[in-house]
Amino acid sequence: SPRPQRGVRGKKPYSDATAEAMDEEARAIVDAAYQKTVDLIREKREEVEKVANFLLDKETITHDDIVDCIGPRPFKGDAAYQEYVSKRHVAKEEKKEEEEESKEEEEGPIMGGGDGLTPGLACTDSHPSGRFWDR
């Protein structure tokens, strides 16, 4: 029979038979989930070994690393989840920004005397008020 929990006062709102039935049902759910997990690991043994070896080499891996190692999931996740777990879109955006910055540096300053300073900002120190347009 179930043991009374510490800190719980009073009588439980169900019988010992109901408590036993709940325990049996919970045990059946856990046992079924455990068996499903063991079966899945056996079925996907090759993929599990690949990920395990990858972890031995790298110690910390990302979702993108797993996709590179064993391929994408067999089902499509929700878009917000994909964006959260995958950093590929961030890397693509950073690369695009770096390319744009590199292109701007190659082109040189668009305006100004070729000193590379942003027009307007280069003049702010030349007037005591800091307002270059009041000259």
Image: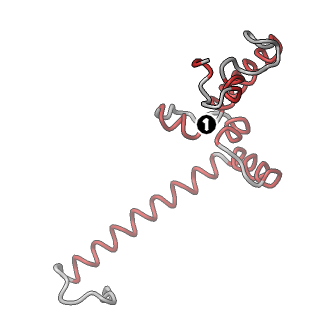
- Looking at the picture, tell me which residue is in the foreground, 47 or 82: 82
Q: Is residue 83 left or right of residue 64?
A: left
Would you place residue 107 above or below residue 15 in this image?
above
- Looking at the picture, tell me which residue is in the foreground, 110 or 60: 110
Quadrant location, the N terminus: bottom left
- When asked about the image quadrant of residue 38, the answer is bottom right
Would you place residue 97 above or below residue 13 in this image?
above
What residue is drawn where x is 47% and y is 35%?
Answer: 80
Q: Position of residue 49 (x, y in %)?
A: 74, 50
Element type where label 1 sits in the image: loop
What residue is drawn where x is 69% and y is 28%?
Answer: 94
What residue is drawn where x is 48% and y is 31%?
Answer: 79
- When asked about the image quadrant of residue 84, the answer is top right
The 10 Å Cα crowd at callout 1, few under 14, some 14 to 19, many 20 or more, is some
**Total numbered badges shown on the rendered structure:** 1
- Looking at the picture, tell me which residue is in the foreground, 120 or 29: 120
Q: Position of residue 39 (x, y in %)?
A: 57, 53
Q: Position of residue 29 (x, y in %)?
A: 39, 62
Q: Position of residue 30 (x, y in %)?
A: 44, 64
Would you place residue 82 above or below residue 20 in this image?
above
Quadrant location, the C terminus: top right
Q: Amino acid at mark 1?
A: Ser
Would you place residue 14 above or below residue 4 in this image?
above
Would you name the residue on which mark 1 appears?
Answer: 86
Q: Is residue 15 left or right of residue 61?
A: left
What residue is drawn where x is 64% and y is 52%?
Answer: 42
How is this picture coloured?
secondary structure
